[in-house]
Amino acid sequence: MYCGLLAGLENEDQLAFVLCHEIAHYLLEHATKGLVREIATFHDKAFKAKVKAANKQEFNRNEQLANIYKNVLFKSRYHRRDLESGSWIRWPIACF
């Protein structure tokens, strides 16, 4: 949880919401699943080929490598948009 967020909360309801959100991350194993995806990507043949090709470049090598890694790290940490579709209703989680 981002601690700076706590300073901006206005009431207990908002705190309860944030805590429930973080508990959901834990119960759904988001951190573990994200790490597993990252490790799998780093060992993937296509990923290794991209890194190898970028390393062979004479110019902008560091920028290309940084973009490759940023792309992997960003993809593993995004919030899924299926929440907007209402699929969250089926989650076996209740916080009151």
Image (cartoon, rainbow, N blue to C red):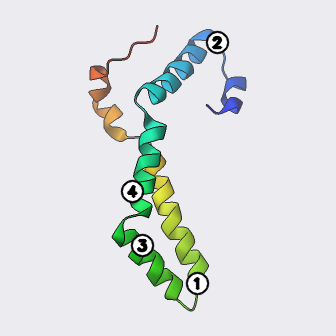
Label 1 to label 3: alpha-carbon separation: 18 Å
Task: Compare marks 1 and 3 and give the one earlier in the sequence.
Answer: 3
Q: Are marks 1 and 4 in contact (CB under 8 Å)?
A: no
Within-10-Å neighbours for mark 3: few <14, some 14–19, many 20+: few
Is residue 54 shown to the viewer in this render? Answer: yes
Q: Residue 38 sits in which quadrant? A: bottom left
The span from disc 2 to disc 4 (Cα, nearest Å) is 41 Å
Q: What residue is pinned by disc 1?
A: 60
Tag 4 secondary structure: helix
Q: Secondary structure at mark 3?
A: helix
- Quarter of the image where the N terminus is located: top right
Seen from the viewer's position, the closer of residues 49 and 2 is 49
Q: Nearer the viewer, residue 82 or 26?
A: 26
Tell me where residue 56 appears, x and y as whole percent.
Answer: 50, 88
Residue at 41% from the left image edge and 42% from the top image edge: 33
At horizontal 32% and vertical 18% (from top left) the residue drawn is: 92
Answer with mark 2 or mark 4, whichever residue precedes in sequence: 2
Q: Which residue is mark 3?
A: 48
Which mark is first along the chain, 3 or 2? 2
Q: Secondary structure at mark 1?
A: loop
